[in-house]
Image (cartoon, helix red, strand yellow):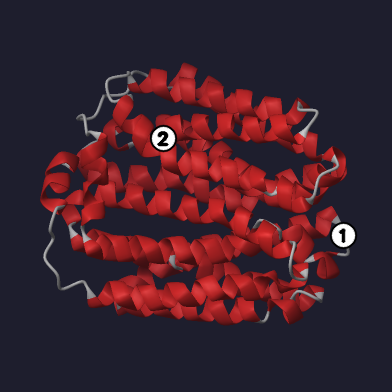
Amino acid sequence: MDKRLLVLAGGMFALGTDSFVVAGILAQVAASLHVSVALAGQMVTIYALTYALLSPVIAAAAAHVPRKQLLMAGLVVFVIGNVITAVAPGIGLVLLSRFIAGLGAAMFSPTATGASLVPPEQRGRALAIVIAGLSSATALGAPLGTFIGGLLDWRATMWFVSAVGTVAAFGVALLLAAVPTPPVVSLQQRLAPLADVRVQRTLLTTWLAYAGLFLVYTYIGLSFDRATGGNPSVLAGLLLLWGITATIGNLMAGRLTDRFGSRRIINATVAIAAVNFALLPLSSAHLLTAALAIVVWGLCGWGFVVPQQHRLINITPSAAPLLLGLNSAALYVGVSMSGLLGGAAINHIDRHSLGLVGSVFIVLALFTAEWAHSSMARPAGGLAAAAAASR
């Protein structure tokens, strides 16, 4: 396996761990800094929103910057942000550091596809290897970080993320030769697909689904405290189970989508997830039922990604890189909004009822998914220029 792709996967592992690990240490952060859990939850909001919104902007603005230099700079900024989080004395600096870490992630992620490192016939495999770094963060990075937080404290978790980012930076410096600079694509060209109503509705589905799915994940320590008994090790075990089933769901969804089409798999995963979340006030009360709910959540939540990507690519295959980038942005905007929505909900309802709030957004995603499907016969509209730019 190409070591250069493993280096990029390592960087994505660090970015993904930072995205998911905060949920496991949120209660510790709140207690340590003497703030509410809802306020501490904005760590997730700021990181994910910065990551989502700045990725296309930086990709366009830094189009002429040598790729290796941009990758290195992104990881350095990412590590600095996490180090500041680890030593910050108050919530204000912690939230500022989340912006810095998100900025570093936005610099690294769009460049780290690996597609320019291999021949065209191997680009799919290269992309899969790099993205595996991100998906493995859900299965390994977040549970390990949560376990470290329980064994030591939440600052140790942030030092762990900083260390992973540092190792990735050294890997880029030592193992990655000059990376070819891809064709320049302006910000206007990157956002051109948004003019197409089919893309708008599909991205709205992604946003609603992940706002609902992560509304509970961001505050999972609170929502599942009856099942875990407040034990960080048990919570880490549930996160590990979630990550493993998420990976399985992602892999299964590819084959199921090829066999049954994207519409059926999207509707099935979203509908099952909605029912699962509606039952969380009951199922999250006991460890066994909580574990079963986690399994369904992981399978359906991440099994939804592949058919959504499939639907977008089928709109205009030649514009696939731009469409997938927008879908990733919609996903992270949904994740970022979950911190705000969940924080607001906690202040007005019982924390064990967050699943009901999440299920509302997931049900709305089911309706918008069908709305998107009904528009698929429409012409491509403004996607022609975007397709040409992404070639």
Per the image, the residue denoted by label 1 is 230
Q: Is residue 310 visible?
A: no
Q: Quadrant of residue 391?
A: top left
Q: Amino acid at mark 1?
A: Gly
Q: In x, y percent, where is residue 221? A: 77, 58
Q: Is residue 85 visible?
A: yes
Looking at the rendered image, the quarter that the N terminus falls into is: top left
The dot on residue 137 is none
Q: Quadrant of residue 378?
A: bottom left
Q: Residues within 10 Å of mark 2 (few under 14, many from 20)?
A: many
Q: Is residue 38 above or below residue 227?
A: above
Closer to the camera, 12 or 215? 215
Closer to the camera, 123 or 193? 193
Q: Residues within 10 Å of mark 1 (few under 14, many from 20)?
A: some
Label 2 vs label 1: CA separation? Answer: 39 Å
Q: In x, y percent, where is residue 179? A: 32, 23
At x 52%, y 71%, the residue is 361
In the displayed structure image, the side of residue 89 where residue 12 appears, left or right: left
Q: In x, y percent, where is residue 346? A: 73, 63
